[in-house]
Amino acid sequence: MDYKWISRKERELFIQQVGVRKRRVVDGNTTTADLCFAAAEKLIDELNWDKKEIDALILVTQSGDYVIPGSGIILQDRLGLSHKCLAFDINLGCSGYVYGLSVIGSMMSSGNIKKALLLVGDTSAFNASYRDKSTFPLFGDAGTASAIEYSKGYPEMSFNLQSDGSGYKAIYVHDGGARNFVTKDTLKQRKIADGIYRNNIQLSLDGIKVFGFSLREVVPNIKTLAKYLDTNIDQYDYFVFHQANRLINQTLIKMLKVPSEKMPLSLDKYGNTSSASIPMTIVSELGDDVRKKNLSLMLSGFGVGLSWGSAVVKTDKIVCPEVLEI
Amino acid sequence: MKVEDFVLKIEEELDDLEPGKLTPDSNLDAFVLNSISVLIIIALIKTEYDVVVDAEDFAASKTINDVFNIIKDKKK
């Protein structure tokens, strides 16, 4: 972390409390779709899946290649998947992995989908202002691929998904959509607060609001799901949380009264990678475990929207490639 | 629930504070120097008192006592 916009003391406090020591940022020629493409190719290869058998591709992102069309459809073609494969995008960030799994799980339970790809990621760092200390040092860029296959006799995935649109301004980009088109003023940087300058197409984050929301909503959401499944919190092997801020995650795990060893953190290496943070953490921190053991995982994503949700996923010695850097 | 205990806990959580320097009447501006300090205090309040104090609550508070009164109100 050699971010010069803030003082050395601020940097030290940021690393210590927020937890981001390093992060990866794409160059100007690489998009989320490119990152997800590389991850998908590697995963399909290691799984030895026949691409013709992939029935669905869902891309969860807020940084698609174009405003129109969604990048998931373009990835169907880039990956060489058949025309029988359905493909679409979901516009979600921090909660996106859990939501994406839920959509694929529902489609599989209806019977027509047997093999699916869930591609999840964002290039939020690329969209943050260097002169905005509330966003620039926090976000990293990542794209991930998960392969989900329907098999009889395996445990179901279970979900508890929630939303509160009244908090939409907590994390947002003001211009560029249909509500506020890009104008000649869009690219003008403005002072928002001390150490925070950005233009209207750069990411805006109200960290204190998101922090309060996370402490208020995440633990009840997890406990409701665990209770619905008639399980105790201590039965889960790991709690894989969205990687927004170490202080949030440490407080959540204390509130759940779970040992911190059950809560992997990848934030120090990759920063907040938006929707990619949960699969990124599984691959980066739990790779050996998910390859060799049967695990019961509680996943929880929370943030932009505001949107949040948890999932219980049981894994059975899954194929998990190493983190790939391109 | 005593404000003196809250003061001690703040001193434990925030770096660079000399023990015994803060009082319930201490002005927040004097030691809450950045947004990360606010997050640390919000996390402390949630963990110790099971209450979430928002940014608006902080903005409306001048002293530790003011924050503590908000915690007591939210506990009711």
Image (cartoon, coloured by chain):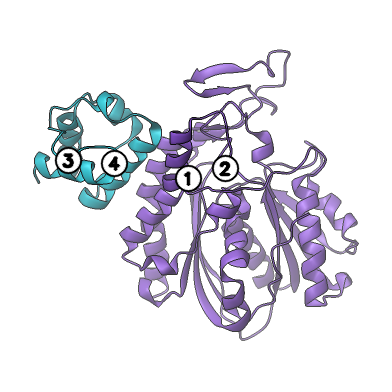
User: On residue A15, which mark appears?
Assistant: 1
Q: Are marks 4 and 3 on the same chain?
A: yes
Q: Residue furthest top?
A: A184
| Residue A308 image offset from top left, x and y in percent | 49, 51
| Residue B45 image offset from top left, x and y in percent | 25, 45
| Residue A97 image offset from top left, x and y in percent | 60, 57
User: On residue B19, which mark appears?
Assistant: 3
Q: CA distance from mark 4 to mark 3?
A: 10 Å
The N terminus of chain A is located in which quarter?
A: top right
Residue drawn at x 90%, y 56% is: A77
Q: CA distance from mark 3 to mark 1?
A: 24 Å
Dot 4 falls on a residue whose secondary structure is loop
The C terminus of chain A is located in which quarter?
A: bottom right
Q: Is residue A80 left or right of residue B31?
A: right
Q: Chain of mark 2?
A: A
Disc 2 to disc 1: CB gap under 8 Å: yes
Dot 2 falls on a residue whose secondary structure is loop
Q: Amino acid at mark 1?
A: Ile
Please tell me whether residue A324 is drawn above or below residue A314 in the rendered image.
above
Q: CA distance from mark 4 to mark 2?
A: 22 Å
Q: Amino acid at mark 2?
A: Met
In front here: A7 or A277? Answer: A7
Whether residue A132 is visible here, answered yes or no, is yes
Q: Are marks 2 and 3 on the same chain?
A: no
Disc 3 to disc 1: CB gap under 8 Å: no
User: On residue B14, which mark appears?
Assistant: 4
3 or 1: mark nearer the eye: 3
* Circle 2 residue: A1
Query: Quick one: label 1, few (<14), some, or many (20+) residues within 10 Å?
Result: some
